[in-house]
Amino acid sequence: MGWPTVFVRLTGCPLRCQYCDTAYAFHGGQWQSLDDILAQVASYGAAHVCVTGGEPLAQKNCLALLTRLCDAGYQVSLETSGALDIAGVDARVRRIVDIKTPDSGEQARNRWENLDLLQAQDELKFVICSRSDYEWAREQLQTHQLARRCAVLFSPSAAQVAPAQLADWLLADRLPARFQLQLHKILWGNTPGR
């Protein structure tokens, strides 16, 4: 967090998380070639690129895009729902994988076998909607020994859990997890393209 980053948002998502803040990415957008996307990314002059969605892995050319971005020398991350297989993702990509909590409404879509594919550079993220979500996530963290695999992030769902409340829970339990906020929303709100 904190590095100037170009976000490439791909359209479409098979999930409907109750807290989704990018429902506009379910439909619409415009078809672009990989060359056009790479040219647009280059125009920003940033070293970091994050491919996100929607669910980027739902797009058939996502894997090729990730590889092309890596080949072009970018530091690339992929934000994925955790509901689709990450096995084909280029090993140079930092994978940020959600684990859907009960209050997301999509817990049954978690693809637990993705955990075995994670590397130290990757991250797991829980979006916390309530105290019961937090307790469930804490249990998963411990049961699956997630902090031994990669960095684990706990992020409050906007308007459902106050950031300070989640921070207090994490501190009280001394969990091996990072507190995460969406910096661009703090700086620019929900302005698209910022």
Image (cartoon, grey):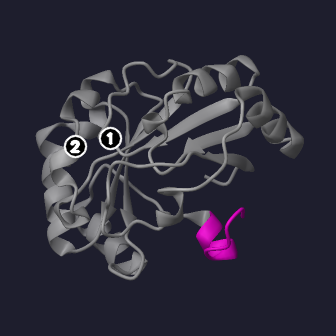
Magenta highlight on residue 191: yes
Q: 166 or 87: nearer the eye?
A: 87
Q: Secondary structure at mark 2?
A: loop
Q: What is the x, y in percent for residue 141?
A: 20, 46
Q: Secondary structure at mark 1?
A: loop
Give the residue at x 32% y 53%. 15
User: How many marks are shown on the rendered structure?
Assistant: 2
Magenta highlight on residue 58: no
Q: What is the x, y in percent for residue 113?
A: 21, 28
Query: In the picture shown, does residue 156 fall above or below 120?
Result: below
Answer yes or no: do the residues labelled 2 and 1 have beta carbons within 8 Å? yes
Looking at marks 2 and 1 on the same chain, the residue that comes earlier in the sequence is marked by: 1
Place residue 106 in its image quadrant.
bottom left
Compared across the picture, whether 30 is left or right of 38 comes to left
Q: 54 or 42: nearer the eye?
A: 54
> Which numbered dot is residue 82?
1
Real-space CA distance between mark 2 and mark 1, rounded to the nearest whole angstrom: 6 Å
Query: In the picture shown, does residue 31 fall above or below 90?
Result: below
Give the residue at x 30% y 69%. 18
Q: Which residues are magenta?
A: 184-194
Query: In the picture shown, does residue 193 fall above or below 131?
Result: above
> Which numbered dot is residue 119?
none
Q: What is the x, y in percent for residue 137?
A: 20, 56
Question: Which residue is denoted by mark 2 in the rendering?
Answer: 110
Compared across the picture, whether 62 is left or right of 179 comes to right
Place residue 109 in its image quadrant.
top left
Query: Disc 2 marks which amino acid?
Result: Asn
